Image: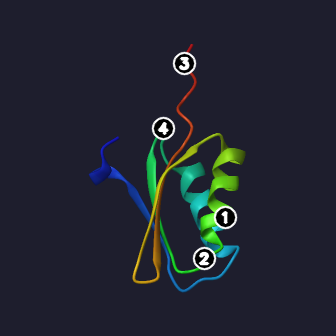
């Protein structure tokens, strides 16, 4: 999935656990192996998201911070192959 096709989850202004809950909902309803970008102002997202992705079987691709906004790109678990 290309970066342009990433799903953006905007959780700016929300505190823990809202950013992780919104990311979980988007990850579970999105395509397998998809990329999601979380925008968050809560610094706890930097800690919570890696745990969430481990729980979902996905991975954190990158974490960037600019002007107090975390941009966390994750990739969900790919669909199982037969």
The quadrant in which the N terminus is found is top left
Determine contact: label 1, label 2, CB under 8 Å: yes
> What is the quadrant of residue 18 in the picture?
bottom right
The quadrant in which the C terminus is found is top right
Of the residues under marks 4 and 2, which one precedes in the sequence?
4
Q: Residue at left 60%, top 66%?
A: 46
CA distance separating discs 3 and 4? 12 Å
Up-down: is 41 above or below 56? Answer: below
Q: Nearer the viewer, mark 2 or mark 3?
A: 2
> What is the quadrant of residue 7 in the picture?
bottom left
Q: Nearer the viewer, mark 1 or mark 4?
A: 1
Residue at far bottom of view? 13
Query: What residue is pinned by disc 3?
Result: 81
Of the residues under marks 2 and 3, which one precedes in the sequence?
2
Where disc 2 sits, the SS reads loop
CA distance separating discs 2 and 3? 36 Å
CA distance separating discs 1 and 2? 8 Å
Characterize the local packing of mark 1: few (<14), some (14-19) or many (20 or more) Cα atoms within 10 angstroms: few
Q: Which mark is residue 43?
A: 2
CA distance separating discs 1 and 3? 31 Å
Q: Which mark is residue 33?
A: 4
* Number of numbered markers: 4
Where disc 1 sits, the SS reads helix
Q: Which mark is residue 47?
A: 1
């Amino acid at each position: 999935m290309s970066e342009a096709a990433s799903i953006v989850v905007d959780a700016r202004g929300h505190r823990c656990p809202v950013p992780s809950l919104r990311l979980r909902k988007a990850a579970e309803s999105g395509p397998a192996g998809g990329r999601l970008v979380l925008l968050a102002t809560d610094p706890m997202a930097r800690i919570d998201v890696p745990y969430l992705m481990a729980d979902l079987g996905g991975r954190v691709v990158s974490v960037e911070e600019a002007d107090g906004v975390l941009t966390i790109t994750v990739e969900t678990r790919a669909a199982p192959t037969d």
